[in-house]
Amino acid sequence: MTGNSTGNLLGITCEELEELAVAHRQTRYRGRQLYRAIYARRQTDFTSLTDLAKDFRQFLAANYQVRYPSIERRFESRDGAVRYLLALEDGQTVEAVYMPEADRTTLCLSSQAGCAIDCRFCFTALLGLKRNLTAGEIVGQVLAILVDRPLPKRTRLNIVLMGMGEPLLNYAAVMRSVKLLSDPDGLAIPWRRITLSTVGIVPRINDLAREPVRPKLAISLNASTEAQRTALMPVSRKYPLRQLLAACRAYPLRPGERLTFEYVLIDGFNDSPADAHRVAKLLAGLRAKVNLIPYNRGPEMPYQPPPLERVLAFQKELTDRGLRAFVRISRGQDVGAACGQLRLAGLEVKNLPAPAN
């Protein structure tokens, strides 16, 4: 069984729990019951699982636990979003964001503690990479928040892997967590409501394309030329735009599915009509939509968002050229919960130079 040394069963698959049951003289079905109890019914007390034999419950209680990341702090925004600081078992911390709306709730999850990508506009880059998260720690963010804020009945739950870290640099754990989240016998969140955001790790995008169970894909574009993107996102030196867009063109989309391209608009850097025209040209022929995100400012960064009229003009340039384009005003800006702002307040950070325009 692929678990961890602390005996926490969170992150363990149905097949592995079946093996655990068989190893202790239970039927495989008892493992499936345990799986549904952990994920679908969100139970953490083995002694309450009265559908299991008493001796099996006693064995589980003596040797295993189901522990979620613990909530260290909540930062509640005026717009209803909540930024959570979550502590992991080894003392590392990550952040996740709860964003309620009228008919749905979105949870933004982290896949790494910190991040190694060094995007020049992102506050998480200031932390550097601490470590990858396990599948249990990724799924545990969902469960910890849902215990803290139970959803009203019939509320749609969306998951976005857009928090701390680059999900495709923690590929195995992220894909395991996606399967647990989307399994009808698990958390039962349909794949169409799970989105993974990447800076463009081309080999892993190719791997993702072959997965039988996979989330929707979002690409952080943020620039209209190779030089501009490299200045803003150094990862473009390793995976240049031409390779990234080739992988996107080869990516197999399901019926009704579109690729999402995220474009953070920075005042005077990547927000001109010429930039919009180049973006439309880059994405021509792709079944895609573009999310335009005015930059979320902060004291350690030298950037500013463009005026609203320039944002709307950029959107019009794209739509006039046949692209679906939407302006996304990030939730939770007043508590550092907006796109690119997650940074574990209070930790020492490294400095990043500003890109040259």
Image (tube, helix red, strand yellow):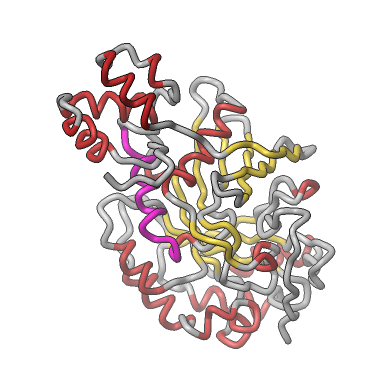
Q: Residue furthest front?
A: 62
- Which residue is painted at 60% across and 37% down in the image? 70
Number of dots carrying numbers: 0
Q: Nearer the viewer, residue 266 or 169?
A: 169
Q: Is residue 270 above or below residue 70?
A: below
- Which residue is painted at 31% across and 33% down in the image? 184
Question: Residue 178 lies in magenta, yes or no?
Answer: yes
State the quadrant of the C terminus: bottom right
Residue range highlighted in magenta: 168-184
Is residue 214 toward the left or the right of residue 145 in the image?
left
State the quadrant of the N terminus: top left
Q: Position of residue 256 (x, y in %)?
A: 36, 50
Say which quarter of the image contains residue 87.
top right
- Which residue is painted at 46% across and 55% down in the image? 196
Question: Residue 231 lies in magenta, yes or no?
Answer: no
- Which residue is painted at 75% across and 40% down in the image? 75
Say which quarter of the image contains residue 43.
top left
Q: Nearer the viewer, residue 93 or 325?
A: 93
Q: Is residue 270 above or below residue 4?
A: below
